[in-house]
Image: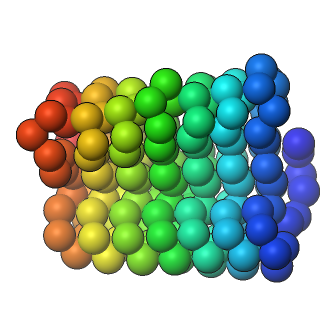
């Protein structure tokens, strides 16, 4: 999926959800969708690269349901939930060089036993956290830039959550 514009859709702009699917989503624009800009779930293997997701009703980009892969060089901003949300045990992703700014909750959000590496992302002026790990999520945050977020730049908010924070 390359070079598409998905705007004002009732649900999700770009939905990648078939088990075992391998998809590259590049250079798409997803604006003002009723739920999410881009969603990958159901065991899909994805490369989500250089997309713009803005002003969606939930997340700009969500990876869940054992999706695996990389999201890099995306701009996800002014969404009503998070810029990029990662959920569900078995979901394993690398988020690299993304810009997640001015979202209503967090820039990057990891929850429900996911494994994630956040590397070189910029998260500015999100209402709660720049980068948040919770609910037994693990991984690392390396060389990210978080500025002007409401509560924390980078946080792990439960005792069984164990990311490694380095050079942020």
Q: Nearer the viewer, residue 51 or 57?
A: 57
- Residue drawn at x 22%, y 75% as measured from the top left: 150
| Quarter of the figure with residue 69 | top right
The single residue placed furthest to the top in the displayed view is 20
Residue at 16 percent across and 51 percent down: it is 157
Q: Position of residue 15 (x, y in %)?
A: 79, 49
Q: How is the image coloured?
A: rainbow
- Taking the image as shown, residue 114 lies to the left or right of residue 136, namely right
Q: Position of residue 84 (x, y in %)?
A: 51, 53
Picture residue at 61% right of the left edge, 31% below the top: 67
Q: Is residue 67 above or below residue 62?
A: above
Instruction: Write down the quadrant of residue 141 in the picture.
Output: top left
Q: Which quarter of the figure is the N terminus placed in?
A: top right
| Residue 144 in view here | yes
Viewer can see residue 148: no
- Spot occupied by residue 168 in the image (x, y as percentages of width and height): 21, 42
Image position of 168 (left or right of 75): left
Q: Is residue 30 left or right of residue 87?
A: right
Q: Where does residue 17 sit, x and y in percent of width and height?
A: 77, 39
Depth check, front residue: 87 or 3: 87
**Measured along the vertical axis of the image, is residue 39 above or below residue 147?**
above
Residue at the extreme left of the image, as rendered:
159
Instruction: Please report the residue visible at 27 percent of the width from the left and 63 percent of the height from the top.
Output: 129
All told, the count of numbered labels is 0
Q: Looking at the rendering, which quadrant does residue 147 occupy? A: bottom left
């Amino acid at each position: 999926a390359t070079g598409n514009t998905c705007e004002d859709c009732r649900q999700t702009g770009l939905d990648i959800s078939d088990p075992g699917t391998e998809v590259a989503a590049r250079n798409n624009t997803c604006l003002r969708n009723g739920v999410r800009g881009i969603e990958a779930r159901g065991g899909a293997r994805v490369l989500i690269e250089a997309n713009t997701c803005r002003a969606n009703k939930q997340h700009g980009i969500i990876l869940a349901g054992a999706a695996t892969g990389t999201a890099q060089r995306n701009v996800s901003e002014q969404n009503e939930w998070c810029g990029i949300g990662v959920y569900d045990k078995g979901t394993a992703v690398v988020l690299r060089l993304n810009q997640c700014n001015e979202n209503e909750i967090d820039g990057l959000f990891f929850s429900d036993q996911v494994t994630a590496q956040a590397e070189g992302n910029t998260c500015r002026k999100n209402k709660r956290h720049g980068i948040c790990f919770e609910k037994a999520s693990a991984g690392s945050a390396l060389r990210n830039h978080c500025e002007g977020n409401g509560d924390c730049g980078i946080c792990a908010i439960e005792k069984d959550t164990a990311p490694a924070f380095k050079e942020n």
